[in-house]
Amino acid sequence: MIKTKIKNKIGIIYLDRPEALNALNRHMIGKIEETLKSWEKNPAIKAILFDSKLERGFCAGGDLKKIYVDYLKNDEARNKDVFFKEEFALDKYLMTYPKPIISHWFGVTMGGGIGLTIHSDLIIVDQTVNWAMPETSLGFVPDVGLGYFISKLPQAMGQYVGLLGARLYPDDLLRYGFCHMVIDSKDYGEVINRLMEFDTGSDNLIGDFREAIGDLGQELKETENSKNLEKIEKYFSKDSVIEIKKSLEEAGDDEFAKKSLEVLNNRDPFMLEVQFKKYFLGKELTKEETIDLDLEIIKYGRKTGALEEGIRSVLIDKDKNPHWPTKSLEDVDQEEVHKLLGIK
């Protein structure tokens, strides 16, 4: 499920679970943590590289199908939140890992795979990356600490990405500081060649390596999001989710608004309200506080049944017809939202 090797004093962790597009399970999380802890104490290893053995992408996120079967639908499971607790503990460990980390995002890069690597010292992406955090369709909100970064986005873009799970394209990731470099996928082999020949004894390993591969970086290009930025700002710079919905409903024949409204209407109303307010709250939270809050929100979604229903509709039955515990935005208990988020 993972493969490891050491070359040129670089410890490499390859995700390698092809049948599930590298979706993380407890075994993988445990092996990654075990490997990192052993390498932390190994003076011969100077840096870490996270990569994937698959052609289709880096990681599809956490293995929510297994969580559904093993925990949510299993009455005998005593600790139904154990996967998320262990996943988040690993992510928090990586926030302060003492050795430099390089990560390669390409193809499908979502959820838990992003959380695993978002704190890396150097994130390299290519034009194939399909990056998204669609958790409001699954009965919770963008988790694994990603709210810390989403809250750094301009308000309209932050709400667009957080509420709808909208994709960030490679150049968006660079533009908004989610990655450090965009390359052409055909040049990744050259990146690795230079890494394996690099002087890993450098006192400024990441900075010097970035300089060594700087000629492979691409200039910023326009994306679907930058093309639609005026519309994103028009519809998503509102003071509530209800106002966002109303602006989309009143947009007439605007195809962008129609598609956005369709997505919004299929999301968990309660978690939309949570995510809307969490965007603003997140500006004041540390990375550690953000991920601790994420765990509390997931626990809440499990207790109300939203998490189970979201996974069922998207990944199990795949009918895309969720029956959320809260039926509409008007039915959301705002006091309950504030209580969950710790807002007084």
Image: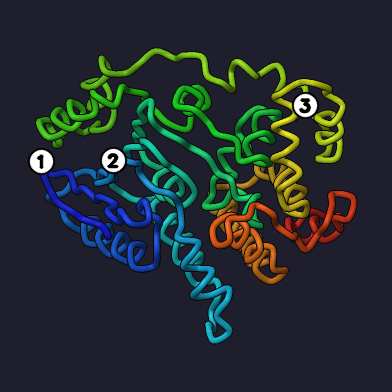
Please state which amino acid type lies under the numbered disc 1. Asn
Answer above or below: position of 12 versus 325. Answer: above
Dot 3 alpha-carbon crowd within 10 angstroms: few under 14, some 14 to 19, many 20 or more: many
Mark-to-mark CA distance, 3 and 1: 50 Å
Please state which amino acid type lies under the numbered disc 3. Tyr
From the image, state whether disc 3 or disc 2 is nearer to you: 2
What residue would you read off at disc 2?
Answer: 55
Query: Where residue 331 appears, x then y in whole percent?
Result: 88, 55
Query: Where residue 36 appears, x then y in whole percent?
Result: 27, 57
What residue would you read off at disc 3?
Answer: 235
Dot 2 alpha-carbon crowd within 10 angstroms: few under 14, some 14 to 19, many 20 or more: few
From the image, state whether disc 3 or disc 1 is nearer to you: 3
Name the residue at the right extreme: 330
Please state which amino acid type lies under the numbered disc 2. Glu
Residue at point 71% right, 33% down?
260
Mark-to-mark CA distance, 1 and 2: 24 Å
Residue at point 24% right, 46% down?
53
Q: Is residue 95 visible?
A: no
What residue would you read off at disc 1?
Answer: 8
Identify the image quadrant of residue 122.
top left
- Earlier sequence position, callout 1 versus callout 2: 1
Could you tell whether 238 is left or right of 78 in the image? Answer: right
Residue at point 25% right, 43% down?
49
Question: Between residues 327 and 174, which one lies in front from this camera angle?
Answer: 327
Q: Do the residues labelled 3 and 2 touch (CB within 8 Å)?
A: no
Question: Between residues 38 and 202, which one lies in front from this camera angle?
Answer: 38
Dot 1 alpha-carbon crowd within 10 angstroms: few under 14, some 14 to 19, many 20 or more: some
Residue at point 12% right, 50% down?
44
